[in-house]
Image (tube, grey):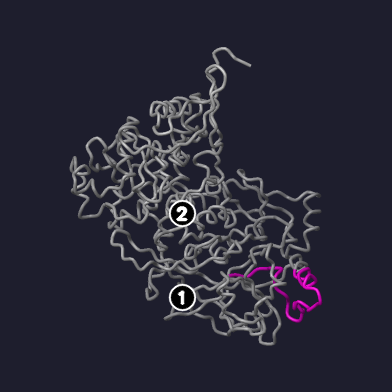
Amino acid sequence: EDVSGHPGTSLYVNEQWINLDVLRRRISLCDVNHGERCGRGRLSRKEDMIRPRYLVDTYRACLVHGEAVQSEYVALSYQWGQIDSLRNNIQLCKDLLVPGSLATEGVASRIPQTIKDAFEMVKLLRYRYLWVDSLCIVQDDHQQLRSELSQMHRIYNSATFTIIAKDGLDANYGLRGLKDITAPRRHKRTYARLSNSEILVQTNSMSTHDNRIPSKYQERAWTFQEQLMSRRAIHFASGAIEWQCNHGSQAEYDLLLPDHLYKRSDFQFQSITRNMPTPMGLNTAIGLYNQRELSFPEDAFAAFAGVQSMLERNHADRFLYGVPEFWFDIALNWTPSSHEGIVRRVPSEQHRSFRQPYQLPSWSWLGWAGQVAFPADAGLRMNDRYPNPCFTVPVTTWYTTPIPSSADKRTIGSGWYKHRLLVRDTSDILPTGWKRIWMDDEDLKKLALGKSVVPDCLLEQKYYFKHDKAELKYRYPFPTSLPYRGEQEAPSLQTAYLFARTERAYMCGQIISPTRVRYKRDGYSFSMWLTRSNGQHVGYIQLHNSNDMEAFGPSESPHSMELVATCKGYTANVSVVGEDWNVFPSEEGGNEQRRIGRHLFRTPRACYFVLWIEWIDGVAYRKASGAVAAEAWEQDREKELVDLILG
């Protein structure tokens, strides 16, 4: 039915050229109507707004010092790709500060097309300054490189908006569709003329920034934090553009109305900023990131550094190569979380003088490519539905240093156990935001029902803890954030080697036959029994990939494995000495599989959580993680502690 004066439901979009007037209007509507939510950015504190060291002055075609610029700047997020292009360095930087330097033939010819087009687009949108990593970070100035990589979340958050170039495979594709400036785009739409002046338009219903649209940009590790932290963005994807801000998004064809926005999906950002600061709360972020691709595997930490800096703010302590130090004894027991497994990140052979190499330790999930997860801890979060492992007591103190031979070791401040002891004294002052709640009859009933999956040591506690910003119940409180540490504070130094004096034992690994593998539960696709010399199953080890599994050969041939302890606790996946946990043969494999399934809901047993290690030139490297029944471990462990150097 006709409505007089109705503006219609869609704007006309040219298939080759972008309507910049419409784009300017979208930015203006956001500026006027969305206030501080879009004005300040995705990070809540005023102190998070910073100035990068250098910016590109697109009017004068040169670099300028960021601290001297009072105006807003635009950021660029793009794919470098495998092309030879201009990258700033110490020798070149002084020359690039000279007005006109970026327009000289010798320099301009080495600047990729996407960056050149970004210069022009910034001016067309009536801005002046641009931040682009290859020019604004001095690539061989290791101090600036480390500082700005760790502040990447703030650089993109502080930009007034980010130009996100998703099309193409590298930086030479360009920002297509800027009339008289760049190559035309290919934005195919189907039109059907109806009665009178009405036109029916068929277009893609998915947002241009939707992760479901195939794009190499979405697969790259470097772009993860750039897109995540941009408070506002212009997306170039699939030949179309889309405006996105903290309120929502608008496609090119959407009407120019301030409230005509599709809600922005924030689950990735919220997984970093709003989840409670526990190991399990990190799993969405690290799982999404660690699936992404890197041209140079050694860049895995560098591409994550900005996210890690943001995580440090929300957690109680610093992170070391993606592992939270407050939970260190627990977090070392991370595992693969998909049936594809994970593979070791091996540094590339290509020598690159413009970027500092980063060591990737085997004990960190960043040293491996693929989906990973920190363990759920029944000793922390109250969840009586599944027999999650329970971590109770650390067995050693961990230290770290940049090289194995260094005598200067920093103690890793793992503080979870100290806070776990708070439950013993009801008079202790709790960390900010926490309250102790005594269980009511319903809670006690649930506690009794959970006896089959909760260790006895947890059943004695008749109260739980809740935090102001979470509905979850916890068995003990923990700090939830760090105070602001100052804009100029240097990022946490990442040191790749761990030291500890801990317990060691040798046991045998034995493959679980295919009918006995838990393919659908807890990612145990590559599990192996840990057995004693008499063949008794006393634990398990979860390998990283199928190659590790194949290296063990037939299940009848156990192989010796060197194990070191990380923590004491409980798990339902081990047996006590004298209890037969062997899977009995049967005529139907299904009986064996159900037998394994029933063990998932056994009463948890005391255990030691362990790492399987391998020594190379005096340094041990992680091979896998698992657990051993406490009684068996205490009988079989060596009398002397081992001086562990873990790289």
* In the depicted structure, whether residue 527 falls above or below residue 634: above
| Quadrant occupied by the C terminus | bottom left
User: Could you tell me residue 97's position as x and y percent?
Assistant: 20, 44
Q: Which residue is mark 2?
A: 308
Let me know if residue 273 is in the magenta part.
no
Residue at point 56% right, 48% down? Answer: 271
- Amino acid under disc 2: Gln
- Amino acid under disc 1: Ile
Closest to the observer, 474 or 93:
93
Left or right position of 310 against 417? left
Highlighted magenta segment, given as a residue range:
567-596
In the image, which is nearer the foreground, mark 1 or mark 2? 2
Kindly identify which numbered label has been placed on residue 645. Answer: 1
Let me know if residue 588 is in the magenta part.
yes
List the single residue furthest toward the bottom.
534
Q: Secondary structure at mark 2?
A: helix
Count of numbered badges drawn on the protein: 2
Residue at point 32% right, 59% down? Answer: 355
User: Could you tell me residue 8's position as x and y percent?
Assistant: 54, 21
Q: Secondary structure at mark 1?
A: strand
* In the depicted structure, whether residue 265 falls above or below residue 472: above
Kindly identify which numbered label has been placed on residue 232. Answer: none
Asked if the residue at tag 2 contacts the one at tag 1, i.e. Cβ–Cβ closer than 8 Å, the answer is: no
User: Could you tell me residue 147's position as x and y percent?
Assistant: 35, 53
User: Could you tell me residue 438's position as x and y percent?
Assistant: 73, 50
Q: Residues within 10 Å of mark 1 (few under 14, many from 20)?
A: many
| Quadrant occupied by the N terminus | top right
Residue at point 37% right, 43% down? Answer: 76
Closest to the observer, 227 or 326:
227
